[in-house]
Amino acid sequence: MLLHHSRRVFLFGSLHARARGIETDPELLYVSAMFHDAGLLTPFSDAEQRFELDGADHARSFLLERGFPEHAAEVVWLAIALHTTPGVPGRMGGEIAATTFGVLTDAIGWGLDRLDGGQVEEIVAVHPRGDFKKEFLQVFVEGLKNRPGTTYGTVNADVLEHFVPGFRRGSMVRRVMDAPWPQ
């Protein structure tokens, strides 16, 4: 399921970039798309951190170990680390924006009406969605339920709040009120 999702993210992101006149390095966009949800499957660090950071850290290591320049690894790191951050990635560089556009299209249908229907059908025929909605959310629950604190301030808290009984999202108000300051 995640393989097909990641390939669709690359293809939808590429279509959005082309339609908007955004230049991307297809190889970096592909790596960003392929690793963007890797942190949901296996935490790649010993530290409890957001799944996006696990995937971004792993992608950076992958690229540097294969001789890619630091700048390329940083672009991919940012694309993955920010892909669940609403509003910010779309205003950044090509690969960063296109990765998020692809994620948004595949996950929630964002911009689907702006893409060529025939191209979308072709992509889905090669990379079928199956029971994507159910399976995708289940992957999120499994990847996040043992590190719920990492969802603070992210859309990931929405998933746990919906599916994990007793989960209560963190709030900025609670953090300010509970701060160790006297007033």
Image (cartoon, grey):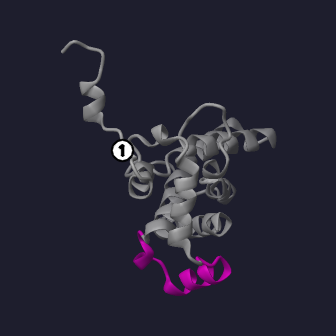
Q: Is residue 92 left or right of residue 73?
A: left
Circle 1 Cα neighbour tier, 10 Å, few/some/many (<14 / 14–19 / ≥20): some
Quadrant where the image shows the C terminus: top left
Q: Which residue is mark 1?
A: 168
What predominant SS class does the magenta segment belong to? Answer: helix
Residue 13 is a magenta residue: no
Residue type indicated by callout 1: Arg
- Residue 111 drawn in magenta: yes
* The furthest residue to the left: 183
Tell which residue pokes out farthest to the right in this image: 66
Residue 4: x and y in percent read: 65, 70
Residue at image location 41% in from the left, 78% down from the top: 113
**Residue 26: x percent and y percent?**
66, 60
Q: What's the magenta region? A: 110-129
Q: Residue at x 68, y 65 (%)?
A: 3
Residue 79 visible in the displayed image: no
SS assignment at label 1: loop
- Residue at 25% of width from left, 34% of height from top? 173
Work out which residue is located at the far front of the displayed protein and give it: 165
- Quadrant occupied by the N terminus: bottom right
| Above or below 36: residue 117 | below
Q: Horizontal and vertical percent for residue 37?
A: 60, 54
Q: Position of residue 134 (x, y in %)?
A: 52, 70
Q: Is residue 81 left or right of residue 70?
A: left
> For the image shown, how many numbered marks are present on the structure?
1
* Residue 67 visible here: yes
